[in-house]
Image (cartoon, grey):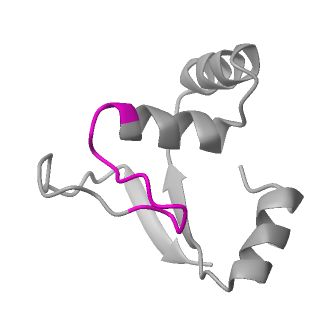
Amino acid sequence: MHTQKSRASTEDNKVKLKRLTIDLTPQEHRTLKGLAAKAGLTMREMVLETLRQKGLLGRSKRGGRRSSAGPTEADPNVEVTDS
């Protein structure tokens, strides 16, 4: 879900990105990929935009910061690692 274009713009802005790994079933992956393609977005863009629309992620161009509202409990199916 990381494109060459975003990598280049990140280097220009000197923003350190973090990696997010989500375990999906094959059907969930196909659905997400199809929805993103239909919207003309990458899967990454689709996920980030959905989180922003729900008010769970700020609109900062540097990756955003989650608002104080929203879930704070860690999801055991989500792994966050340094890139």
Residue 62 lies in the magenta-colored region: yes
Whether 30 is among the magenta residues is no
Magenta span: chief secondary structure: loop
Q: Which residue is painted at 14% across and 48% down in the image?
A: 71
In this picture, residue 30 sits left or right of residue 73:
right
Q: Which residue is drawn at the image coordinates 62% and 41% (left, top)?
A: 45
Q: Is residue 5 above or below residue 37?
A: below
Residue 75 lies, with reference to residue 65, above or below; the image says above
Rendered location of residue 64, percent (x, y): 42, 61
Which corner quadrant of the image does residue 37 belong to?
top right
Point out the image quarter for the C terminus.
Answer: bottom right
Vertical relation: 41 (above or below) 20: above
Instruction: Identify the residue at horizontal 44%, vertical 67% (top origin).
Output: 80
Pick whichever, 64 or 43, lies toward us.
Answer: 64
Q: In this view of the protein, which residue sits in the foreground, 50 or 79?
A: 50
Q: Is residue 39 left or right of residue 52?
A: right
Q: What are the residue bounds of the magenta stretch?
A: 53-64
Q: Is residue 24 left or right of residue 73?
A: right
Task: Name the residue located 51 percent from the left edge and 60 percent from the top edge.
Answer: 20
Q: Point out residue 23 in the picture as x, y percentages from the top left corner.
A: 50, 43
Task: Give coordinates of residue 67: x percent, y percent.
Answer: 21, 55
